[in-house]
Amino acid sequence: VRSKMKYSKELLELKRKEDLLVRMKKYELAEQVKAQADALEEWENAKLEAEMKETMDKKVVKFKHQQQLELSALLKRIQRDRNEQLKHRQLDSQRLIQRNKNICNDILAKQNQEVKKTVSSIKQVLSMVGSDSIFVPRNAPQRSHRAQSTNVSARRTTGLNSNSFTKAAKKRESIRSAGPRKLKSRAKSTRGV
């Protein structure tokens, strides 16, 4: 750093004077001039170092300020991106919640339709069979739609359909209307066979 320092004209003049006095062999005067030159050089070096330190401090402050601005801009951009991500995430979650609600509503609507179909088919079968073939006490609790639908499915699996129920009901009706005499005659005829 000191090699790049520029000294004043006075200092350069004193050094040149010192060299001339040494050549002229005036050592006492040369020593006095050298002392003056050394003092002036020391003062100028201190002054130049102080100026250089001041300029370096200014550059450091400016650099730190620039870094701070860049950091704040970066933090703002990060916060903006984070807010956008949160907004997108909330929109996606709202869409998923709405989709799940729609699916649940569709499933409930289908289930209600199936229950209505099952209840109407059970009522239809019961109306075909007739009220005298099935005894339901008044105090008996109402059976749930699920139990009724399982009975209908059990009838289907055992091969009993509405036609077999109607045939059985007609047979019972004919036996009841025949009375006890015809039953006895039927019993005798079956014994004789």
Image (tube, helix red, strand yellow):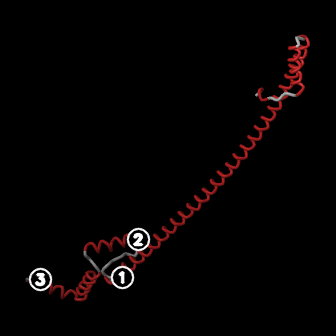
The residue carrying mark 1 is: 124
Comparing marks 1 and 3, which lies closer to the viewer? 1
Residue drawn where x is 43% and y is 76% of the image: 113
x and y percentages locating residue 76 in the rendered image? 68, 51
Question: Label 2: how many residues lie within 10 Å, few (<14), some (14-19) or many (20+)?
Answer: few
- Give left or right: position of 161 versus 29: left
The quarter of the displayed image where residue 89 is located = bottom right
- Quadrant for the N terminus in the image: top right
Q: Residue furthest left?
A: 192
Q: Nearer the viewer, residue 155 or 26?
A: 26
Q: Earlier in the sequence, mark 3 or mark 2?
A: 2
> Which x, y percent locates residue 140?
39, 72
Q: Which of the 4 image quarters holds residue 15?
A: top right
Q: Secondary structure at mark 3?
A: helix
Say which amino acid is labelled 2. Ser
Dot 1 alpha-carbon crowd within 10 angstroms: few under 14, some 14 to 19, many 20 or more: few
Q: Give the percent coordinates (x, y) of residue 108.
A: 47, 70
Mark number, residue 190: 3
